Image: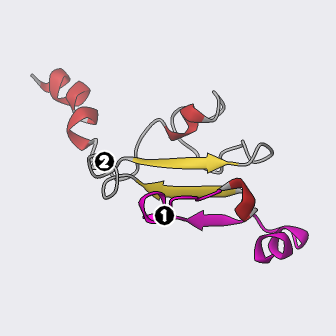
Amino acid sequence: SLAALCRDRGAAVVVDGAHSLGAFDDLDVPALGADYFCGNLHKWFCAPRGGGFLWTRDHATESGFVSQGHGEGFASSFLWRGNADYASLLAVPEARRGA
């Protein structure tokens, strides 16, 4: 398979299965052979935008992301969402000092 070919050459396999959960009745993610499989939930699951999932193969549990929670476990590596605007929250301490 393409996934096996990539892994044989040292490449991690990431599948963007954006709408796959609702499009396929019998989706077998592990059978795809990917290391990571991600998708969103806002269309087929009627979840709010931004809701999604990340499936990882057992050996692929180290996050490649650096976040405030880095080094404190897999889930903590994703502590801060990259698409959120935290500017107003981060400005509070400085605003308080100036008040």
Mark 1 Cα within 10 Å, few/some/many (few <14, many 20+)? some
Q: Is residue 80 above or below residue 46?
A: above
> Given the current orientation, which residue lies at the most extreme front position?
25
Q: Is residue 82 magenta?
A: no
> Given the current orientation, which residue lies at the most extreme left position?
99
Q: Earlier in the sequence, mark 1 or mark 2?
A: 1
| Quarter of the image where the C terminus is located | top left
Which residue appears at 72% of the width and 43% of the height?
62
Residue type indicated by callout 2: Ala
Which residue appears at 28% of the width and 35% of the height?
90
Find residue 20 and name its label.
1
Mark 2 Cα within 10 Å, few/some/many (few <14, many 20+)? few
Side of 19 relative to 71 (left or right): left
Residue type indicated by callout 1: Ser
Q: Is residue 3 above or below residue 47?
A: below
Where is residue 58 drawn, in percent x and y?
Answer: 77, 42
Which residue appears at 73% of the width and 48% of the height?
57
Side of 84 relative to 75 (left or right): left
- Tell me the SS state at disc 2: loop
Q: Is residue 40 above or below residue 91?
A: below
